[in-house]
Amino acid sequence: MPPNGATQQGVGMTEEEIWQVISYIRSVQAKAPAQIPGNAAHGKELFYGGAACWACHMIEGKGGRLGPDLTTTGSARSTDYLVESIRSPSRRLAQGISEAMKEFSQEYETVTVVTAEGTKLTGVVLNEDHFTLQMMDTREQIHLFDKSKLRSFEKSRESLMPAYDQKMLSDKDLQDVIAYLLAVGAQ
Amino acid sequence: MKLQMGQWAARTRFLPTGSEPSVASFGMAKLRVSALILFTMGTVGASLMSAQVTPQRLLDSAKEPQNWLMYSGDYAGRRFSALEQINAANAAKLVPKWAYQTMAGGKFETTPLVVDGILYGTGQDNRAFALDARSGRPIWQYQRALPADIRPCCGRVNRGLAILGDKVFLGTLDAHVIALDSKTGNVVWDVAAVDYRGGYSITLAPLAIKNLVIIGVSGGEYGIRGFIDGYDAATGERAWRFYTVPGPGEPGHETWEGESWKIGGAPAWITGTYDPATNTTFWTTGNPSPSNRGEGRAGDNLYSNSLLALEPETGKLKWYFQFSKHDEHDYDATQVPVMVDQGERRLILQANRNGFFYVIDRADGKLLFASPFAKVTWSDSKDASGVPIARADASPTLEGNRVCPGAAGATNWMSPTYDPQTQLFYVTAREQCDIFSTAPQAYEAGHAYYGSAYFPNEDAAPFTGALRAIDPNTGKMKWEWKHPSPTWSGVLSTAGGLVFTGDAEGNFIAIEAATGRALWHFQCGASVYSSPMTFAIDGKQYVAVAAGSALFTFGLP
C-alpha cells in the first residue's frame, strides 16, 4: 500500500523511492529558466495596479489575504503552472492548510453561507470538517461556524479569483507579472 | 544483539506527572477534572481479577462483553460489543475520560485489548503498554529497539496485541514475534519470524487460537514471499508455516510465471478470524509483487489477494477464494473477513479494497454474490460464478491509466463491523481514483518493488469518503455518513444501537446504527488511523480510539 496514509512517506524509503518522489516533484516544480522573459518592474506595477492582484494576494507583506501569499510562488512553481493559475484559476485550486496527520490538504475552495440571522457571506474555506467551517470572507473577516446552525452552506470549486483572459491581461502583461513573481521568488 | 527496553521501561517513571496537563487537553472544565480524579482515587483500591486468559475465555468472549479480548473483539471479526450502557438515547452526553500519549510520531493504529481492568495496547515504533483502564495510568511500557534499516512500507505502525495465558504477543517491524509478560512487560520469548532485511515486517495484531499464536507478514511492496505462521504460545517454537505463494510441486504454483513465485508478495497483514464450529481460521492476503506490473508473473498469482481457510493446528489449507486475480492495482484483500450466520448459511462478508462487497459461503469458499460498494472501473463483468473480472484495458500503462478505486482502495485495513441487531455491515468507503503508471523494475532484495510510480489525480474533484451501512442480503446500501475526505478509521458497533467511527479531520463520531444520524462527536486534534473498541469497568462503559499520538477514552458523565 505505497501511497497511502501519506504522513509517513519519508520513513523507510529506499534510494529508488526517494528518486521517484524527486522526479515527480521536479515534474511540477519550477524549471529554472535560463533567463526570465518579461519586464518584472512592469509586472510589479500591474500586480499593485491595473491587474489588482494585490487585492487578494500578498507579496513580501504587502497585499491581501484572501488568496495564497505569492512571495515564494515563483521559485516553487513552473511557469506553466503560473500561467494556468492566472488564466484558469479554477482548474487547479491552490493548497491551503495542511495538517500533520491529514492525508489531503485543504484547498482554496469558494464558500457561500447564509447565517442563522440571514447574513450572506462569501469567501474562501480556511478549513472544514464534517461539523464546522472556518472561512475568510471577501472583507478578510474570519468566521467560525457550526455548520448545523447555518441557514445554508454551499461550496464551489469555482475560484473567487477571476480568470484573467486576454482582455483583462494581455500575453505581454501576463509575461511581465510572471517575470515579477519569478524575480521575487528568486530573491 | 537484541536490545530490549522493556525491563528498564517498566521501572521508568512515567512523565509528565500530574493529571492536569493531559486532562486539560480535552478542554474539560476543571470542576469535572476534579470529579474524575476523585472518582479514580476512590476506585483504585478495588481488586482486579487476575485470572489467566484461557483459550476457553477467547472462545466465550461473548460471555464477558466488559472485556475486549482480541483485535476484532471476537473470533468472528465483527467488532460488535454487547455493551449497551452508552446508547442512542444518551450518546450525546459522552465526555472524555482519559487519554494516554505515546508521544511518538506517525500513525497510531492500535486497537487495544482490555482484560479485567487492564488495557493493553501498542504504539508507533513497536511500543507496547499496559494501562489502568480506569485512569489511563501506565502499569508498564515497552519499546523494542529497532534496527535502523527496517523498511515498513507505510509507516512504523502496529495494530495491536493478542493475549493468551499470562502473556501478550507482539509482531514487530523487524519481523520478530515477541511474548511479553502481561503483568510486567518483560520479554518472555522473542523469535525472528524471518530476516527483516528481505523486506519483511509485522504490523498486525496476532490471533491466539488454542495454544497457538498466529501471525502474518507485511512486505508486499518489497518482493517478499508471504506467509502465515503459527507459534507455540508457551515457548515461541514455530508449529507451522503456510506460504501464501506456493512453491514447486504445490497446488497453485502453476499460477506463477517462471521464478516469479520466489518474490511473489501476497503478504498477510491483517488479523484473521476463527470458526470453532469447523475449526477453521480465515486469513486474507495482499497484492502480488510487483504491485503494479503484471509482466513477468503471468497467471492468477495464487494466493495473492485471497481469502484462505486454514486448519489452525497445522496451517493446512482447506480452501481459498481469490478476489483479484493477477492484480496490478495493489488491491490487497487484507480486510478482516467477518463471519456472519444467516439462518442455515454460514458466511464470510468482506468489503474488499477493490470496491466489491463479497458474500462467501465459509463452508467451501463459494461466492454467493459480489456487488460494488464504491465506484469501480477496473471491472465491468463477472465470470460464470459471479466473480468480478478485470477489464483488459484497466492495466497500468507507462503514461498512466485512471482507475477506480485508486491505490489506497475503496477501503483498506480499517476494520468494518457487523451489527447483529440491525443486521447491517458497516464499512469505511474511500472514493478515490488514481492514475496508475508502470515501468519495468529490476528486483533487488529488500528494496521497494512496485513496478510503478503513482501520480495524483489532479483533474478530479477532491477525494471523499463515507461510512456505509450495507445489507448483506442484497449488497445494497441502507445509508451513508459522508466524510469530507477519505478516512483511515475503522468502525465499531454496539448493542446500544450505535456505530463509532473517526475521520481524517480528527473527529470521533457516534452514529445511530439504524439511521446513520450523528449523535455526538469529539475533535481529537488529529486524524484517526485506527479502529475503535469498547469495554467496561465497575459497571461503566468506555469507548476508546487512537488518534494522533493519543489513545482517547470516552464515557458517560
Image: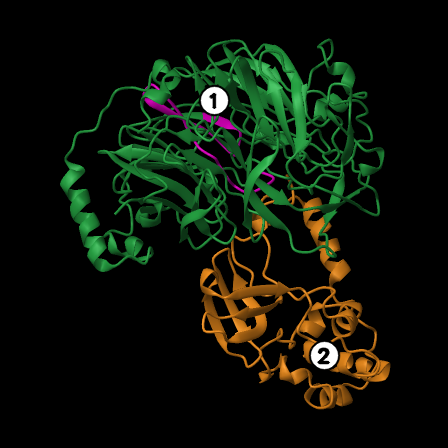
Q: What stretch is highlighted in magenta?
A: B152-177
Q: In this view, does A98 lie above or below B160?
A: below
Question: Where A45 falls versus B52 (above or below)?
Answer: below
Name the residue nearer the viewer: B278 or B100.
B278
Picture quarter containing residue B25? bottom left
Q: Do labels 1 and 2 share a chain?
A: no
The type of residue carrying mark 2 is Leu
- Chain letter, green: B
Q: Colour of chain A?
A: orange
Horizontally, residue B61 falls left or right of residue B355, namely left
Name the quarter where the C terminus of chain A is drawn.
Answer: bottom right
What is the quadrant of residue B213 in the picture? top left
Residue A11 is situated, as x and y percent measured from the top left of the image, at 57, 46
According to the picture, the residue beneath numbered tag 2 turns out to be: A181
Q: Chain letter of disc 2?
A: A
Task: Please report the residue visible at 64 percent of the width from the left and 36 percent of the height from the top.
Answer: B373
Q: Which amino acid does label 1 sit on?
A: Ala
Rendering quarter of residue B165:
top left
Answer left or right for B79 relative to B262.
left
Tell me whether circle 1 and circle 2 mark residues in contact (CB < 8 Å): no
Q: Which SS class for mark 1?
A: loop
B167 within the magenta span: yes
Q: Circle 1 sits on which residue?
A: B76
Can residue A13 be seen here? The reply is yes
Judged left or right of residue B414, residue B405 is right
**Up-down relation of residue B368 to residue B153 (above or below):** above
